[in-house]
Image: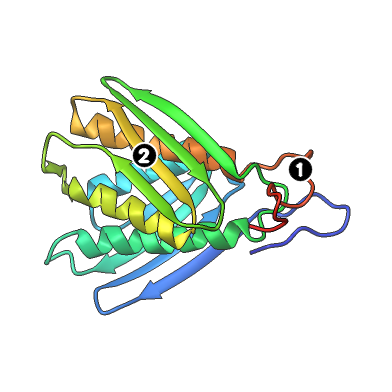
Amino acid sequence: MEQETGGCQPLKRKASITRTTKETDITVTLNLDGTGMSDIHTGIGFFDHMLEGFARHGLFDLTIQGSGDLHVDGHHMAEDTGIVLGQAIAQAVSDKKGIRRYGYFILPMDDALALSAVDLCGRPYFEFECSFPTPMIGGLDSQLIREFFYAVSYSAAMNLHLKMLSGLNSHHMAEAMFKAFAKALDMATGRDERIDGVLSTKGSL
């Protein structure tokens, strides 16, 4: 990650991570202080669409290049992308000095209403309350949305709660969830000049 220097403006917080296994080969490049630009190729069209929405609405610059055993199914791609994205978030946010730490958002998407809450506390915990009405959303198994977010939360060592407050259409529900997470993460990673060090009575996160 690029670090802050002297009295100058802080440099952008970036990370680039590659993870290669026998099942997938994934590279994620993340800029927390971006403008919402993305270039995403996982081989699963609907998954790409969700990740593009995450980048755009969180104002993160995000590049993901992934290949893997999609002839089996999308499980390894979704889960491993979550692992690498979580690692990139953790690396880009670095020592967490000066950030708000907490973020939350309730986002509407037509019939869907999604809640996301984030704590960048360094202790992974995950809660997910959503039942999609269809087993597939485009080319993505709807069960894999939970697996993706679980992997993100544990790899980033964040406390992440996702709850679908209402919804009828699986596409809208998934999109609301990804965008709500983006807005909550943007808030949590945002800087507050009033915060001296990290936002914790322990002195570290």
The residue sitting at 45% across, 57% down in the picture is: 124
The quadrant of the rendering that contains the C terminus is bottom right
From the viewer's perspective, is residue 115 above or below residue 89? Answer: above
Tell me the CA gap for discs 2 and 1. 27 Å
The answer to which of 82 and 10 lies nearer the viewer is 82
Of pointers 2 and 1, the one earlier in the residue sequence:
2
Residue 56, horizontal then vertical, whole percent: 46, 39
Identify the residue at image location x=29%, y=60%.
79
Q: Which residue is mark 1?
A: 195
Q: Residue at position x 42%, y 64% from top?
A: 84
Left or right placement of residue 101 versus residue 156 in this view: right
- Count numbered badges in the picture: 2
The colour scheme applied to this rendered structure is: rainbow
Q: Residue 132 appears at what percent x and percent y?
A: 18, 36
Nearer the observer, 168 or 130: 130
Any part of residue 35 in sight: no
Task: Indicate the quadrant containing the N terminus: top left, top right, bottom left or bottom right.
Answer: bottom right
